[in-house]
Amino acid sequence: MKYFSLGPVEMFPHTLKVAKKQVPYFRTSEFSEMMLESEKLLKKCINAEDDDRVVFLTASGTAAMEATVFNIFTTYDKLLVIDGGTFGHRFVQICETYKIAHDVISLKFGECLTPEKLDEYRGNNYTGLLVNIHETSTGQLYNIKMLSEFCKSKNMYFVVDAISSFLADECNFSKYGIDAAILSSQKGLALGPGMSFIILSQKVVNKRIAKNEPLSLYFNFNDYIKNQKNGQTPYTPAVRIAYELNDMLRYIVYKEGGVEVRLNNIQSDVNEFRKRICVCNAEIPDYPLSYAVTPLLFNKRGINAEDVYMKMRYEHGITLTPCGGELKEIMVRVGHIGCHTHSDYELLLNALEKVIGKCTN
Ligand SMILES: *Cc1c(COP(=O)(O)O)cnc(C)c1O
């Protein structure tokens, strides 16, 4: 089976080698040194400063989204949330759960987040913005520069779920004045699921997190920040994933030549794929797309997207990412994150051509 999925994704051979080793005991200086190195390398990959902090959380991405919100904000805040699909909607649900006042910019499927749309909210007072910079359910990539400038001009905390964007699109913590960037192990990093990593600005740590008293023991970021100063976590982390992470970060920084090389490789593969898929019976949406995914739309071609997913998986051994809800029958997503060779792309394109056929007009 080949995975062109969106998490878990096709893993790299060097990760699989790490994954099959004995999980070591971790309250040791060796583990601490490794975690401190991972912090350094992760900050390098996302361009964070030495004084920024990293929380290594053993939890899925949603838990990291939720914990980030309640460690930074309280019921005294008012937030602006971009809701352009499943993951944006999750941030709305988190605000509702914690009774944090919020306005929602709701985007219908296919609708772009334009400067005009954002400007409608400029007159209101908000303390923070919550956005999934790549809304994975549709593939739309929002304009980070526009959102960053909006937050700066209104003195708002800028919280970016970059879970499905990191290592596919440019993700620059310092350049865009991000206060919290949320990453997860099973997406661009192509590791097993189970850990999330939250990069926090010095400002949000000092002015917010250090002063808040969230009603949670396990998810209190202050404990993680304090422990990570010594390369440790307050509770048992997913030790295996921590080793996979260190191996992957070392691979990107020291073997591949840095995060720019990784981005160039994935982006050139994606551009080539999008150029070649054009001859097939599928449409690519016209909103700005993340390089993590190519959504294929079939509604105008009379093809059922669920059938495409099933045939690709059970007749060709290739797992794409199906859609849920209203998109279930009209769209499938080709995930580009993870380990894909050029011959994997040949297999993918040949199989897609067989399943959906060539475009006749
Ligand atoms: C995958 C993903 C998550 C995390 O989902 P979990 O299933 O909780 O790990 C969060 N946000 C985005 C944008 C994602 O793509």
Image (cartoon, rainbow, N blue to C red):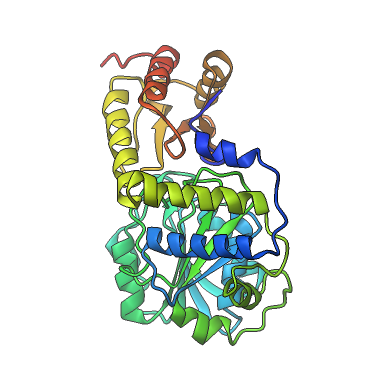
In the figure, residue 157 lies in which quadrant?
A: bottom left
Residue 123, compared with residue 265, is above or below; it is below
The structure residue drawn at horizontal position 30% and vertical position 46%, both measured from the top left corner, is: 261
Q: Is residue 336 visible?
A: yes
The structure residue drawn at horizontal position 48% and vertical position 47%, both measured from the top left corner, is: 248
Residue 196, image x, y percentages: 58, 57
Which image quarter is the C terminus in?
top left
The structure residue drawn at horizontal position 50% and vertical position 86%, both measured from the top left corner, is: 207
Q: Is residue 273 left or right of residue 241?
A: left
The count of marks equals 0
Which image quarter is the N terminus in?
top right
In the figure, residue 40 lies in which quadrant?
A: bottom left
Residue 21, image x, y percentages: 66, 41
In the figure, residue 306 lies in which quadrant?
A: top right
Residue 177, image x, y percentages: 35, 72
Residue 297, compared with residue 210, is above or below; it is above
Residue 18, image x, y percentages: 59, 42
Residue 40, compared with residue 206, is above or below; it is above
| Viewer-nearest residue: 116 or 354 | 354
The structure residue drawn at horizontal position 30% and vertical position 68%, both measured from the top left corner, is: 175
| Viewer-nearest residue: 86 or 179 | 179
| Viewer-nearest residue: 276 or 331 | 276
